[in-house]
Structures are given as structure tokens and as C-alpha cells.
Amino acid sequence: MQRWIRNAALAASAVYLALGAVSCGSKRGAEKAGALNVAAFKGGYGLDFFEDAAKEFETERPGTRVKVWGNPRVWEQLRPLFVAGKPPDLTYPGWGMDHWPLVYENQLMPLDEALAGKPWSGDGKWADTFEPALLKLGQHDGKQWMLPYFYNINGWWYDKALFAKHGWTPPKTWSELLALCAKIKAAGIAPITYQGKYPYYALHGFLFPWVVSAGGIQAFDDMQNLKPGAWKSAAVIRAASMIRELADKGYFQSGSNGMSHTESQMEFVNGRAAMIPCGTWLNSEMREQLPKSGFEMAFFLPPTLDAGIGDPTNIDIGIEPWVVPSKGKNHGTAIDFYKYMTSLPKAKQFVERKGTLTAIKGSDEVKLPPFLVEPAAAFRASKAIWSVEYIQWYPKLGTASQNATAALLAGTVTPQEYAERLEAAAELARKDTETPRHTVTR
Amino acid sequence: MRTNNRGRAWFVAGFLAPATLLYAVFVVLPVCQAFQISLYRWRGISEQKTFVGLANFQRLAGDEVFRQALGHNLAFLLAGGALTLGLAMAIAHAIHGNGRWARVIRGVYLFPQIISMVVVAVLWMFVYNPSFGILKASLQSVGLGRFAMDWLGTPGTALPAVLVTFVWHAVGFHIMLFSAGLRTIPAEVQEAATLDGADGMLRFRQVTLPMLFPVLRVAIVYMVIGALNVFALVYLMTVGGPDRRTEVMLTYLYEQAFKHSDFGYGTALAVANLAVVMALSGLAMLLLRRDPTEAKA
């Protein structure tokens, strides 16, 4: 009897060990096969476009195999792969990745040489097929480390149908905004809702546009360049006071400070709030929840100060970069595949299929979905763009500024105290000798 | 006899080996590694590590946010613990009988415990939703609508709001503990106490509670561990906000490691967390080591 049990236990452990060996073995098998390993963040735009591109690429380049994998938390899996020295050949790590340490620790391949080469089709340089202002966001120390694919434009959203019904028009200036908010409130609708649980949205939607408007784009560049005093400048205090004014007048939907992005966006989509700040991903994020009819999501740039010195065409954009890991096994094919993805026909297809703009010049020359018409026009009309980069450059300052913004919106600090808190956090970033410095240049 | 014994030892060892091996590889080894990593500056993105000695722990000693987070954990332990244990004790006592309601409650009290923490958090976010939440609707239906507010977004109410959810989730498990404990108390003891004139609160204090002591001790240690390691609930409901008003040790750890790429400091926070949990559960066991029923015997 005992022997029988012992044998069974031995058999069980043998099976256990064998399973382990098999699972390790299969992994090695995939590497041996030499497929191009592409890891991508699976967000609102899914993986299907990249998977389809991979299949097409395999026919374009016979004998090549491309494996695309990913999920909504892919950055958490990429870290140990980078540490182990076995990163994918090409990756889009997604917004949750702390990107710049990859550059500091030589985990990425500089792409300047590739960009100087030919694009997928035609002559000229690959670099020239990208919007230069967006390409610039992936540079550091004179080298190109990251490449943009699609990009987001941040602004405010409204429901055209609702506005038309009440005879409202999207406000262009601060005084127009205040007047409109009073009307909306009188109609029994909350004028503005926001994603308070993640103060990142309020920074993009309220604070920075108004800093740019009050102090010009330079005021914001100075902040990102950690210029002493820039985080408590008059422009910052003015912008913070405007946020408080909206809160004090009851123009923010009550309860928005604790709402997640989906909660507040639901309020907007369901017509309980008239306006919301968000990036151009809003439509794809809320696709499932959009009312079947009668809702026309439309974009406008954040209202500017009546006597603002900032150029009102300046817009806030953001990229989610793609990178080529230096320890990848297949640099050439990785770049070739990315060249294919960034070829004009593919980029146009991405715009059409996914409803978002890409960094490839001319890729917006397709039939845009209605909600994307305004953002595309704003990008073409912009004399300069700005991008909130410091959260990635200096994550601690990013966190501190977001916490302070939550306090400002909750009313536990005054605009003056808020600016002092921001400046103190910027001072810590200036003193941080471990994190390399970045500079915005115009 | 001897060979038989040796065979038996091998037999036992054979059964223990896989579990011991797994425990060593997946628990003991990572803990040792954690101690090691906490002495380095490491971004967690390559093998590049810099030895910094105890610098991470020096920073920890002066870290206001860590102190604030620890304070919130203690709030979970003290306020959340007292509420959970009090409620669980009362409910366990109430359903000890055999009435219809007792049977109904016995059938459902464990529900909050068996649903996933993620579902609990989402469920309570709906309860607290300032636009269409049940809490707001309930207050309005009894004419107290003016007390409805942004529970999770207001600095003063966020922590209590998360605490209520924590208690709601934890209470079922403790009812189970206490119910099982109550069943081990011989009916004769209770009857004898009743005959001696000890009834109601007196009987509870003098007979039931002392006889539940071993169970209570276990419950308190569980509470210490649960309250100091709370993460998913806070992370999902408030992400530690607004303005760090619900930050707890583990959400802060996550921020440092994954958002700030400071795995050295994050690991130092993990070591500190381990030390606090061990110290407080040790303290609880030390304070509660004396079983009152034994002392009287």
C-alpha cells in the first residue's frame, strides 16, 4: 500500500517536472524559429492592425516570420524581459512604461542611421515621412530613441446635437466659457465634468492650456525645462485661479473629483455633463457606450484667456512611442517592419480603421470620422505644438504635480499654495542628480 | 522496526519535499533577494545596479509620505479592525441560534469574502458614484439628499469610504471564524452560567468571550496582516488619492517601483512593510498570549 502511494507521488513529481521542462522548451522553440518578436500594448486600438500588418509583411518579405503579442499591461511583462536581456525585437510598450530609463541604461538602439535611410517605398529619407515636431519628441542627447506612430491631440469635447438643441456654441474664450457655463447650468446640465481620480487629465485639460494662454508657450517650456520660478509663475497662478473659479462657481459636475476616466466620460456621453477634457482617444475608448443615435461627439480647443498672450493655435499633443531594443536579435527586420507600418498607405489605413491620427505626413488625407475632423484641422493650423513630457522625464515631479492638482480641485489648497507646492516639487527635480535632464528647444 | 521507521521518514520527506522546495524557491528566496535589492539603486529595466548601502532606508526614515501611508494602514487596522471584529462578533452571536433569519444570514454572510477584490472595489465605486450611486439615491429617498457628496473624491471622506468597503469585505471571514468558535463552546457551560444568573452581556463577557479567546487571537493576527497589506482595494477605488489621502504602504511601493522606476526604494518599502507586519503581529501575539480560561483553571 505504502509503496503504491510512494510510486504515485513519484509519478506525480515526475509529471510536474516534465511539465516544467516542456513549458521552458516550448519558449526556446519559438526563439529558435527566428520570428520577428513584436510586443505591443493592447489598448483601445487593439492589436489587430499590427497583426494584419505582420501577415502582409510576411508576404512582402518571403521567408520572414513576424509574431505580434501584447495585452493591456504589457509594460509589466517587458520589464523582466529587458532585465533578462531577452527583449522583443520591436515594441510599443504603452503608456504605463517608464520609457526614459530604457535610454539611460542602453536598452534601446539609436535610430538615426535608419531614419537617414530610405523609407519603405520611394526615395528620400525615412525621417522626412514623419511630422518633424512629433519625431522630435523621441530625441535625447542628439539621438533618436523612440518613434511615434499614432498621436493624440488633447482638448475639450462636446455633443454637437445637444449644443444645437439649446443654441449653444463651443466657447473660444474664457468669458465665452463663463457665459456658456451659466447657461448650461441653468438648463439643468453640469457644464464640465472631468476624470478627477487621475489628475493627469486636469493638467492637460485645464492647467497647461491656460498657462500657455496666460504666459505663452515659453511659460510652459520653462516649466518643463525646470527653470527656477517657472512652476510658480504668474501664468501658473492665473491658470490655477481659473480652475478654482470654475469649481467655486459650481461649473464642474459635482462629484467629478472622485470619478475615474470611464465614470466621468459616461457622464458626458449620457448627457449629464456638457463638456469634458480628453485626448482624441475618447471616441474609441467610449465606443461601446455611445448612444445609438442623436449624439455627435465633437472637439474644440480649450478656451483661451480673453487677453492671453499665447498663440491660440498652439496645441497639446502626445505620442506613445515605439522602440527597437538594443538587445533584440533582429534589428534590421524590426526596422524594415516598422518602415512598412509607417508607409503612407498603411498609415492612412490606420487612420481610417482606428479613427486616430498618425505621425506620418499626409496620413490624414482620408475620409476622417466626424469627431476627428476638428482635431486634424487644429493640427494643420497649429503654428507650434507642445507636449507634456516632464511626467515621463521626471516621474516624481509628475506624481507631485498630479497630487497637488487633486488638492487644488478639491479646494484644500489655494492657487498661491498650489504654485508653491509645484515649485517645491520642481526644486526637488532640479536637485535630483540621478535623473538625466531634458530640454525643450524651439 | 528500524527499517520500517526509516522507510517512514523517507516517505514523509518525499511528501514534504515538493512543498518545501516550492516554498524555498518562490517564498524564501525572493524574500532574501528583496533584502539584497533594497541595498541597491536599481531602475528595474536592466541588470545595472548600484550598491548604495543603507541609503534607501535612510530616505525611508525621513519620508513623510511613508509615514502618512503607514498612518492610513493603522487606520485600517484600528478603525477597520475594531469595526470588523465588533460586527463579526455581534453577527456571529446573532446567527448562533436556529431562527429563520439566522439560517438566511448563515447562507449569505460569506458572499463578500468569496467575490474577487476587484469586483468588490467596482461594486462599491458604483455605490459611491456621485451621479447615480445607490448611496446618493438612498439618502435622497429619505430626504437627506443634501448630505450626498463626492465620497471618494473629497479628501476628508475618501479614507472612511474605502474603510467601509474594507470592513464590508472582511467581516464575512471573521463571522465564519467566530461562528466556528462559538460552536466549540459546550452548551452545558452556557446553561450553567444561565442557571447561575449570568445572562445577556454578563454571560457574553464572562463566559463566551473568554472561551472564544483563542479564536479572537487568530482573528486579530489576520486583521493585522490584512490591514497592513491592503492594496487592490485602495488602488482600484482611489489610486491612493485624492492628494495621497488614502495612500497606503503598498500603493506607495507600487508607485515608487513601477511608476518612478525606483525598485531599490520600492523594495526597501517592502522590507519595511514586512518588518511592520511582523512586529505588529508579534506584538499582538505577545499581548494576547495568556489565555484567560487557562489562567483561571
Image (cartoon, grey):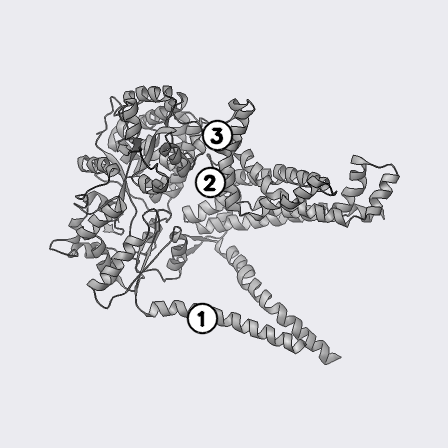
Element class at badge 2: loop
Q: Is residue B59 left or right of residue A363?
A: right
Q: Is residue A320 left or right of residue A418?
A: left
Element class at badge 1: helix
Q: Is residue B126 above or below residue B231?
A: above
From the top left corner, tell me how far across and down residue A149 is, in percent.
25, 49
Are labels 1 and 2 on one chain?
no
Q: Quadrant where the C terminus of chain A lies?
A: top left
User: How many angstroms separate mark 3 from mark 2 (CA)?
Assistant: 16 Å
Badge 3 vs badge 2, beta-carbon distance below 8 Å: no
Q: Which residue is mark 2?
A: B239
Label 3 resides on the chain identified as: B
Front residue of B20 and A327: B20
Q: Which residue is mark 3?
A: B150
User: How many angstroms separate mark 1 from mark 3 (CA)?
Assistant: 53 Å
From the top left corner, tell me how far across and down residue A380 is, in percent.
18, 37
Front residue of A376 and A201: A376
Tell me the kind of residue under disc 3. Answer: Asp
Front residue of A211 and A151: A151
Are labels 3 and 2 on one chain?
yes
Q: Which residue is mark 1?
A: A22
Q: Is residue B206 left or right of residue A253?
A: right
Label 3 vs 2, first from the N-terminus = 3
Badge 1 vs badge 2, beta-carbon distance below 8 Å: no
